[in-house]
Amino acid sequence: MTDDIKHPEETVTTLATIAAPWSREILAQRVDHDSGLQILRLRIKEGRSRFTILDLDAPTVEALMAVMTEWSED
């Protein structure tokens, strides 16, 4: 899924929307900054109006993936 949003300093591309337990929704987005910085943005929607937004760089995503993979294989 791609919904490109262009702001003067960044381009946001939606990668996936995931339904999570307890009526939460996780939106994964790739954010490309004009400076060359690339981040993964996770937007967690809880209910109608509460959001948690995490902007993660590649090393942080790799570390988080390792923890999540280990947890899911247990």
Image (cartoon, helix red, strand yellow):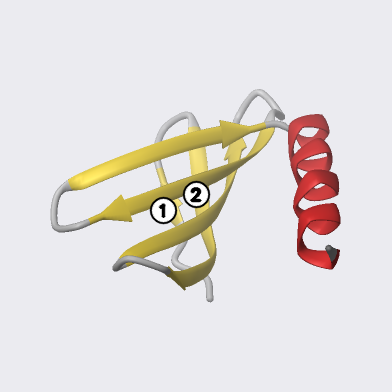
Name of the residue lying farthest toward the top: 35
Q: Is residue 46 above or below residue 64?
A: below
Of residues 72 and 38, the one nearer the viewer is 72
Q: Is residue 9 above or below residue 17?
A: above
Residue 12, which numbered label? 2
Using a 10 Å C-alpha cutoff, classify the residue at mark 1 as few (fewer than 14 neighbours), some (14 to 19) or many (20 or more): few
The amino acid on which the numbered mark 2 sits, given as a three-letter code, is: Val
* Label 1 with label 2: CB-CB less than 8 Å: yes
Name of the residue lying farthest toward the left: 48
User: As drawn, is 57 to the left or to the right of 31?
Assistant: right
Q: Is residue 23 above or below residue 26?
A: below
Q: Residue at x 50, y 35 (%)?
A: 54
Q: Residue at x 82, y 57 (%)?
A: 69
Using a 10 Å C-alpha cutoff, classify the residue at mark 2 as few (fewer than 14 neighbours), some (14 to 19) or many (20 or more): some
Task: Check disc 1 and report the residue beneath it.
Answer: 5
The amino acid on which the numbered mark 1 sits, given as a three-letter code, is: Ile
Cα–Cα span, label 1 and label 2? 5 Å
Q: Residue at x 42, y 32 (%)?
A: 8
Secondary structure at badge 2 equals strand
Residue 37: horizontal and vertical position, in percent?
Answer: 69, 28
